[in-house]
Amino acid sequence: CPLLILPVGKQILPDAISTTLVTGGVALSILAKLSLRRSFGLVAANRGVKRSGLYRFVRHPMYSGYLINHLGILLLFLSVWNVAVIALCWILLWMRAGEEEKVLLQDPAYRSYASAVRSRLIPGVI
């Protein structure tokens, strides 16, 4: 989906803010991937429960990084098209997180983790 973003539209915040969000989001998603190490995969599977690092705050920090990155891009190139693309991305990310959790919640260790870390994407919110 993000490849469908068009670099046109109204910029509503200074470059420094947008750049910080884009860079911070990328950094967050990379850190989440690095902390998973060999547990990272493209297909939902239980490769062990990660509780440390960014996973102490949200259950899907990689997706949180994507959301922050997308927000930065949207603030840089605000248009109806880009809002629609980002909305689709966010819906698909939410659905993917839900599908991953269907697999992971079969594990008592993950159920315990999910009850301790209530937020999927944004600490204290969702």
Image (cartoon, rainbow, N blue to C red):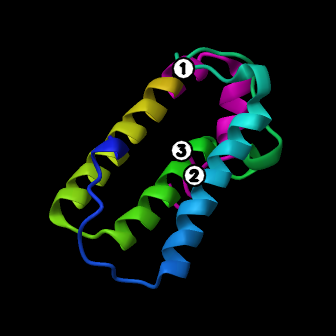
Residue marked by disc 3:
63
Amino acid type of disc 2? Gly
Amino acid type of disc 1? Leu
**Label 3 to label 1: alpha-carbon separation:** 13 Å
Q: Which residue is at a point 60% across and 61% down the rendered structure image? A: 23
Q: Which residue is at a point 24% across and 60% down the rendered structure image? A: 83
Secondary structure under badge 2?
Answer: helix
Please state the horizontal and vertical placement of residue 36, each as a whole percent of the image.
Answer: 75, 30
Residue 6, quarter of picture: bottom left
Instruction: Using the rendered image of the protein, determine whether residue 58 is visible from the camera's viewpoint.
Output: no
Point out the residue furthest to the right here: 52
For the residues labelled 3 and 1, say whether their Cβ atoms are less than 8 Å apart. no
The numbered disc on residue 65 is: 2
Please state the horizontal and vertical placement of residue 91, each as a whole percent of the image.
Answer: 32, 43
Instruction: Using the rendered image of the protein, determine whether residue 42 is visible from the camera's viewpoint.
Output: yes
Q: Which residue is at a point 78% across and 27% down the rendered structure image? A: 37
Residue marked by disc 1:
42
Secondary structure under badge 1?
Answer: loop
Residue bounds of the magenta highlight: 101-126
Q: Which residue is at a point 52% across and 16% down the rendered structure image? A: 43
